[in-house]
Image: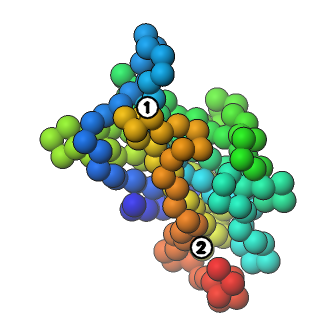
Amino acid sequence: MRAALSGTELVLLLEWSDQTPDVVREDEVNTYADSAAVQSPVSYGKGLRLPAISMGDEGQPVRLWLQRATKTGSQLSDLVAAGFGSSTRQAPAALKQGAMTYDAAAKRWRAQFSIPVSATASLVPVSFALWDGGRLERAGNKRLSAWRFVRVPGRPSDAEYVKAM
């Protein structure tokens, strides 16, 4: 994962190895696409606990950005969740730029996400999920990271918050 700040957008680039690209196919059933997602708490910072890693919880919802491989590129969804199985799609106007491409020579996926961050955020909690369609991974059957933190350059970190995290 690599990150860069562009105004109030945190641009995240994920790369991972995969021997075969699996895409959404409208003409077949029981096929699953390679996919990637980023989640971040709706609210975070000093005095706030992290949400449950499994799509947040009632007291701490998360925002998710999901990309699924398709025949023509990728499909990007913007969701909010407050617990496993509670994801709700956001209006299309809320969608941010994203791109997911497969490099056949390197046998690697690359997915780019652009997520909003507040103008004062210095430490942004994020976690990542990957689905391998060829392994029939879908829904909760996926690889999931723990919470990770992206330090926003040029912004002072709150020592108490850093210590708590």
Q: Secondary structure at mark 2?
A: strand
Q: Quadrant of residue 117?
A: bottom right
Toward the top, the furthest residue is 27
Residue 105 pos. (x, y %)? 15, 41
Image point 43% across, 31% down: which residue? 33
Residue 42 pos. (x, y %)? 72, 56
Disc sitting over residue 123 in the figure: 2
State the quadrant of the N terminus.
Answer: bottom left
Please name whichever residue, 51 or 120, is drawn nearer the observer in this view of the structure.
51
Amino acid type, callout 1: Ala
Amino acid type, callout 2: Leu
User: Is residue 147 visible in the rendered structure shown here?
Assistant: yes
Image point 64% across, 65% down: which residue? 119
Above or below 133: residue 42:
below
Image point 40% across, 45% down: which residue? 111
Residue 112 pos. (x, y %)? 42, 47
Image point 45% across, 55% down: which residue? 12
Disc sitting over residue 33 in the figure: 1
